Image (cartoon, grey):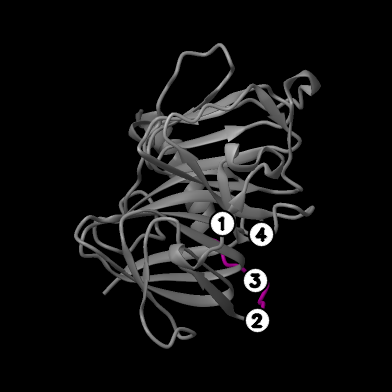
Amino acid sequence: MKLVKATLTLALMGIFSSAYADEVPSHSQVVTANEVNWGYLNPLRGDQSPGATDLWGDRTKDMETGMLVKFQKSFTSPPHIHNITYRAIVIEGLMHNDDPKAEEMWMPAGSFWTQPAGETHVTAAAGQDNMIYLEIDSGPYLVQPADEHFDNGEKPLNLAESNIVWLDKSDVKSIHGKNAEISSLWGSNKIGKLGGSMVKLPAGYQGNIDVNAKEFRAVVIKGDVSYQSAETKQKKELAPGSYFGSTGKFEHGISVSSTGATIYIRTNGKYDITSK
C-alpha cells in the first residue's frame, strides 16, 4: 500500500504543480439534478431500458459525453456489448457490472468501473433506487448484441469504494483545504491531457475549487453541495447527480453539508482545493 500511495503521490504532483500555459476564455455551466430531462438509454427497449439523461455532450453523436443512468430495483440486462468504452461511477444504490458468468459483486455509491468496447457483459442493480454517472470519450453510445463481441485490447476495472486510495494535503500540493482528500482514477498526469479524479470534502467544508483548464467538468457523487460563482446570481443547491463545469481560469465556490461530499472531476488542466 505504501508503494501504491507513493506512486499516486508523484503522479498527482505532476498534474497539479505544472503551469497551464494555454489561456482560454472563462465560462461556466451548472446543471442541477432536478433540472434534467430523462429519456431511455436504449430507446429500442422502451420502458425495459434504464433511464438516461445527458449532463453534457450528446450521447447520440460522435462526441465526448457525460450522462446519468437510472436502473430499477432488480434490473438485470441481457448479455451485450457496446461500440465504445465507457467509465462509470455509482451515485446511488448497488451496481454489478461483469462477465455474464461472473459472481455478483455489488458496488455501492462512490465505486468506479470501466467497460471496454466490444466485451460481453451484464449490468445489474440491487438497490431500491440506482443511479450512475456514465462517461464516454467518443460516440454515439450504442448497445449491441453479444454475438458481435470483439477484443479492443483494453481490460475492464471494478473498483469498489472501499478500495479507493485517498491522498491528503501532505501528499498533494494542490490540496490546501483542511481534511480534503483526492484520488486519481484514470488518464494522463500531464497538463493538457485528460484525466479523472475524485475529491472528498469533509462535513462543513467551505472553500473553492480554483481551476485553470480548457476543460473542467465536475459531478456531485455523494453529499449535498451549495454552489456559487461569479456567473451565478445566487447559490445553487447541488444534490448527487448535479454537474458544474468551466473553461479557462475559474473559481467554483463550494460549501458542503453535514454529511460531507464526494465530487468526480474530469479535466485537462490544473485545479486547487482551498478552504476559507
**On the image, numbered disc 2 is attached to which residue?**
25
Q: Nearer the viewer, mark 4 or mark 1?
A: 1
Q: Position of residue 137 (x, y in %)?
A: 69, 49
Q: Helix, strand, or loop for circle 1?
A: loop
| Quadrant the N terminus occupies | top left
Cα–Cα span, label 2 and label 1? 31 Å
114 lies left or right of 141: left
The type of residue carrying mark 2 is Pro
Q: Residue at x 39, y 56 (%)?
A: 240
Q: Residue 150: in sight, yes or no? A: no
Gap in angstroms between the C-alphas marked 2 and 3: 13 Å
Q: Three-letter amino acid code at disc 4? A: Gly
**Marks 2 and 3: which is nearer the front?**
2
Q: Look at the image and tell me whether residue 24 can be seen.
A: yes
Quadrant containing the C terminus is bottom left
Please give the residue where the numbered disc 3 appears in the rendered image. Answer: 21
Q: Which mark is residue 38?
A: 1
The reply to whether dot 1 and dot 3 touch (C-beta < 8 Å) is no
Q: Is residue 108 above or below residue 211?
A: above
Q: Mark 1 belongs to which amino acid?
A: Trp
Task: State how far apart marks 4 and 3 are (Cα).
Answer: 9 Å
